[in-house]
Amino acid sequence: MVDTTNKAVANMIAPSVTTVRWARAEGKVKISETIKRILSPNTNETMWNTPKGNVVQVARIAGIQAAKQTCHLIPLCHQVLLTNVQIDFSMEDAVIRIRSVAKAVGQATGVEMEALTAVTVAALTIYDMLKSIEPGGIVISRIELLEKHGGKSGSFAKQTSSNVQSNQTQKNQ
């Protein structure tokens, strides 16, 4: 939001009815075949160890900490008292998928930025932990909001091919 002199200002958030607000975000980290071979023998992602430590454990902690610090990282973003942040990791082919869910109760603003920040910092942490194996063999991509609920703007769910097929099937019935 900008004021009458065109300066950026934080939106005023008014107290509203106590509700649960949550958002789900996702990001992807494409890794080289060399890195994949090192991580793949351990199909259980909790075993993805590198010289810097366990990739998943460190990235999860980094993402959770980042979600809690979002208001300090993003200008004009209000501080939110998070009640829960979850981050999960999976690998498909040579792509590590990071998914986060951020939740808050009774806040006057949403938690989309916290969910997105959690994914972003977890992805950066994965990059940092794997770069010594093969510099340039890592690409961070597709950081996006998948879904959000609660708040003034209501709910949002990203349309995917499975969502569209489901909606089309319901219309045809």
Image (spheres, rainbow, N blue to C red):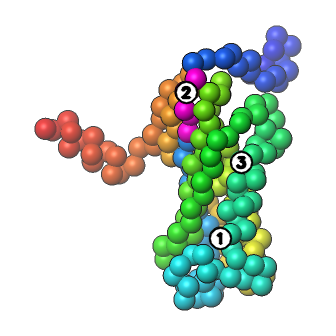
Instruction: Report the residue marked by disc 1.
Output: 56
In the orientation shown, which residue stands out farthest toward the left?
A: 173
Q: What secondary structure is found at the residue carrying circle 3?
A: helix
Where's the N terminus, which quadrant? Answer: top right
In this view of the protein, which residue sits in the foreground, 98 or 135? 98
Instruction: Report the residue marked by disc 3.
Output: 67
Q: Per the image, is 140 magenta?
A: no
- 164 with respect to 129 (left or right): left
Which labelled disc corresponds to residue 163? none
- Dot 3 or dot 2: first in sequence order is 2
Quote the CA–CA distance across marks 3 and 1: 16 Å
What is the magenta range? Answer: 18-22
- Dot 3 or dot 1: first in sequence order is 1
Q: Say what amino acid the circle numbered 2 marks.
A: Thr
Image coordinates of residue 65 in percent, x first then y, are: 76, 53
Q: Can you say whether 143 is above or below 5 in the image?
A: below
Query: Circles 3 and 2: CB distance less than 8 Å?
Result: no
Q: Say what amino acid the circle numbered 3 marks.
A: Ala
Image coordinates of residue 60 in percent, x first then y, are: 67, 62
CA neighbours of label 3 inside 10 A, class few (<14), some (14 to 19), many (20+): many
Q: Say what amino acid the circle numbered 1 marks.
A: Val
Q: What secondary structure is found at the residue carrying circle 1?
A: helix
Instruction: Report the residue marked by disc 2.
Output: 19
